[in-house]
Amino acid sequence: MSEAKLWEFQGGIHPPERKELSNRTPIQRVPLPARLILPLGQHIGTPAEPIVTVGERVLKGQPIATASGRVSAPLHAPTSGTVSFIGMQPYPHVSGLLAPAIVIDSDGLDEWTALEPCADHRSLEPAILLERIRQAGISGLGGAGFPTAVKLTARPQRKIHTLIVNGAECEPYITADDRLMRERAAELIIGIDILVQLIEPEQVLIGIEDNKPEAVAAVRAALGERSFGLRVLPTKYPSGGERQLIEILTGRQVPSGGLPADIGMLCQNVGTCVAIHDTVLLGRPLISRIVTLTGEALARPMNVEALLGTPVGELLAFAGLDEARMDRLIMGGPMMGFTLSSLDVPLIKTANCLLAPTRSELPPPPPALPCIRCGACADVCPASLLPQQLHFFALGREHEQLRAYNLFDCIECGACAYVCPSSLPLVQYYRVAKAEIRELEQKRHKAGHSRLRFELRQERLRKSEEQKEAERRARVEKAARARAVQAESSSVPHQETSLASRPTGLSEHQKKLKIEASMTQVALKKAEKQLAVHPTAELEAQVAELRAAAEAARKALEATTPAAPSAGNDTALKKAKIELAMRRTELKKAEKASADDSELAHLREALADAERALHAAEEASDRPAPQLVRIDKRPVDEKLRALKTELAFARADLRKLERDETIDPPVLESARTRLAEAERRLAGYQSE
């Protein structure tokens, strides 16, 4: 633990610390609340999913929500009680909007579930240690809230050579980590030992600001013979930022848009290390945290260990809140915290401070004035950005320029706004711009996903149409082959007879007579019209001649046209057919009704008479007698019918699934397999 070189990071400020308000008393325990509100999203990433139901009794430490994705963390019951509600509840966010949560009504027993403590963490495999951390729901307790198990495996292909433990706690007013290091230094060091066992770094560096001498002494005493490097940093805000702390301790900078793991480093907060100790050695999940209650509106500023889900109003009441003096309530510190709209919001994993200042203590900023381009913001920016340019780009919504000027490297520390002589709320501009860019990226991603889905659907429809067209061509070819076989099986004399039996058209002479008769009729009608308008003797003679010519043409045409069958013969033929159908129907009904033999004989005789009458009518009508063909119908094959029915259903189900865009590929593949199996079984049966 020899003295080592420390580096400087660019920028930084020295605001009033005001830590003496809350760091003078030990950590207190608050009374057990009657109701706990546990939001499902208490970390960066996907919110957890409930695994309990309303009315279910839960025990302290029992899982009540499971991680729903890779970047997610489970949630546990902070005390025993009954789940009274699952739904939208107040949430600590600057928007004041509600969020999904699980509400537990405490039964006052504080009864633990079965735990799995481990006396010696060195006996556990790294994979088991990592799984314990994951199942305990531990996320970063320094404020960011990234799931710890995910952070430990963020870059498995890169070797982590340096583990950095962050005890700087640089933000004014906050003393939660200070009191934790003073009172639980031994557990902190064991938590670091577990991390060393997991990632096997070459060196461990612990950074603590020099305004915490008691914490430095406690950690130094707990280190013993370990080779961990304890570094005491000069007090400057924001030295507790991850990138800034890495630069102070190692002199290296995290590349823009990158992670500490990209340069072989991993940072963990001291509170996270203690939570790892409690999980591995005691078997306890993350159900509470140390939180600073401070501000001049409190009668007794202090640090408390509070259960997650405790309404912040109850915590402030425990510290003696005077609501008449409180100007506003801030979750976090005065630099990076945000104002809460209600005292009903619950405590969550990332809440390290509740600040209740008076108006004189933290007066509201004066009205913003135009930027005077003084450059003070660039001088104090710890990320080496150009806040002035980012401000103008954010006003103009020039997103490409904001990206080019590395907006997302901004840690939103508020140093630029702190020194701005125009009182510009620069951090708020940056937050809005980041949100707009993220929203546009999400829209682009959704649009790309929709385009991909559309293209896949079009491809499915194309394949479906190709398949239908192939089936149609196959049916046409099959029908053509059937017609060809039928034509070959027909006899040639029969074909000739059929052709000869067809009636021929009119002869040339008949056509000529028909045309002459038509022309004569037309001339006659025209002359009759003229005669009706101008009756003269000459026209009367002409009409008489045309009538005689038309009559002669008609007689000549009738003489060459064969006589058609008489209507009386056709009527007799129709009656005979109807009579035969009636006699056949009567006989079938009698056979189905099991009539007497005498009645059946009488009906059969009547049917025979009707057939003879039909034959006589056909001969009298001068029409060729129909050729009677007797066809023996095959009996119904029930198995064949069932196989064809199954094939039809399988084909219909497959077409229905193919039209559904949201259907899962395994379901579609199963339907295709079913259709293929139905076709195979039908073909096999027909070939037997």
Image (cartoon, helix red, strand yellow):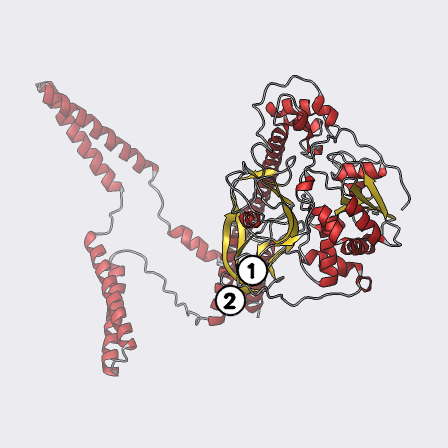
From the viewer's perspective, is residue 81 above or below residue 374?
Answer: below
From the viewer's perspective, is residue 512 above or below residue 129?
Answer: above
- Residue lying furthest bottom: 597
What residue appears at the point 51 percent right and 66 percent down from the top-left corner?
A: 643
Split into 4 quadrants, where in the image is the C terminus? bottom right
What residue appears at the point 63 percent right and 36 percent down from the top-left corner?
A: 334
Q: Which of 377 and 610 is in front in this view?
A: 377
The answer to whether residue 485 shows anywhere in this view is: no
CA distance separating discs 1 and 2: 11 Å
Q: Tell me where residue 129 sits by quadrant.
A: bottom right
Q: Where is residue 172 in the image (x, y as percent from the top left)?
A: 68, 37
On screen, residue 42 versus residue 610, left or right, reads right
What residue appears at the point 20 percent right and 56 percent down from the top-left corner?
A: 571
On screen, residue 662 versus residue 509, left or right, reads right
Q: How crowded is mark 1: few (under 14 residues within 10 Å), some or many (20 or more)?
A: many
Q: Where is residue 116 in the image (x, y as percent from the top left)?
A: 70, 66
User: Residue flagged by tag 2: what amino acid is it?
Assistant: Leu
What residue appears at the point 90 percent right and 41 percent down from the top-left corner?
A: 3
On screen, residue 599 versus residue 303, left or right, reads left
Which residue position holds label 1? 675
Which residue position holds label 2? 643
Q: Nearer the viewer, residue 595 or 563?
A: 595
Dots 1 and 2: beta carbons under 8 Å? no
Q: Where is residue 327 in the image (x, y as percent from the top left)?
A: 54, 36
Q: Which of 638 and 339 is in front in this view?
A: 339
- Residue lying furthest right: 2
Please, what secondary structure does the residue beneath circle 1 have? helix
From the viewer's perspective, is residue 421 above or below residue 134?
Answer: above
